[in-house]
Image (tube, rainbow, N blue to C red):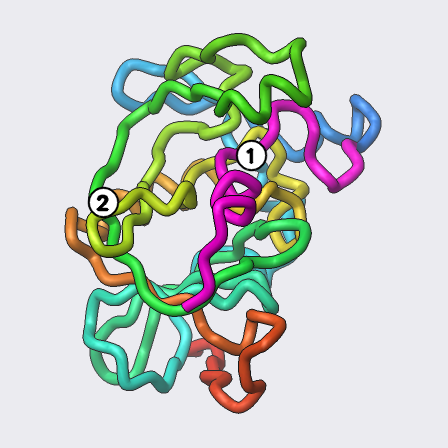
Amino acid sequence: MVWTRRNILAGGLALLGAGAVQRPAFAQAASYFAGTAVDNGVTFRATNFAKIDRQWHRQVVKYFSSEPIGTVVVDTRHHFLYVIMENKTAIRYGVGVGREGFKWFGRATIDSKSLWPRWTPPPEMRKRHPELPEFVAGGSPKNPLGPRAMYLHRDGVDTGYRFHGTLEPWSIGKDASSGCIRMFNEDAIDLYQRCPIGTAVQVLPHIADQAPAAEVSQATPVE
């Protein structure tokens, strides 16, 4: 397992308005949304999944893994997150990952979760981007975490990495964040419901630069 202070800081919450994926023109960006939805009293822009490539849609796939049912497996190379189910299947979600990929691999747990979380840029980020606010309230249309955040810990220590929603649905399937795993807002809501506190998370070792390329699980859609 490789952890460094720099990696944890770099792998913190996604930069507000500073993603690596170029923002589409206004009209094109608007096409990624279709109306609004309401969640726990908060109205947010719904994703236009007709605009999204089918491979990034949430779907049940055949998935061969020795991990216990309920484990979350992250494959950042291929931009997928899996929740292991019975009968060699998994729920697969398309995700956006860190621009430089994860600088760590191995295991963590979801030790805390938040519904419409507040976003607080870390001090190091605000030094680089002094225009950032001290915090963005949960439910704000400018909050990059979206409707849910799930916080990854290892040995009781917050890693700085999260699963969360996004303001930029066009970034799913790309290296887009500062290290966290971003999801369509609807998928973040779905994953939040499926993952109780203590859920095990495995980040596949083949995504790390120094890891062997052998351990790659196979997944095929269930017809």
Q: Amino acid at mark 1?
A: Ala
Q: Quadrant of residue 173?
A: bottom right
Which residue is situated farthest in the right direction here? 25
Is the residue 54 above or below the residue 125 in the image? below
Is the residue 25 above or below the residue 81 in the image? above
Mark 2 and mark 1: span between their CA atoms? 22 Å
Q: Quadrant of residue 169?
A: top right
Q: Amino acid at mark 2?
A: Gln
Q: Provide the secondary structure element on which disc 1 rests.
A: loop
The image position of residue 66, as x and y in percent, is 28, 85
The image position of residue 56, as x and y in percent, is 56, 57
Write down the residue under mark 1.
14
Q: Residue at x 49, y 45 (%)?
A: 5
* Residue 181 seen in the current view: no
First in sequence, mark 2 or 1: give its number: 1
The mark lying in front, picked from 2 and 1, is: 1
Task: Categorize mark 1 by other alpha carbons within 10 Å: few (<14), some (14-19), many (20+).
Answer: many
Task: Categorize mark 2 by other alpha carbons within 10 Å: few (<14), some (14-19), many (20+).
Answer: few
Q: Give the number of marks.
A: 2
* Residue 171 seen in the current view: yes
Q: Provide the secondary structure element on which disc 2 rests.
A: helix
Q: Residue at x 45, y 57 (%)?
A: 3
What segment carries the magenta color? 1-23
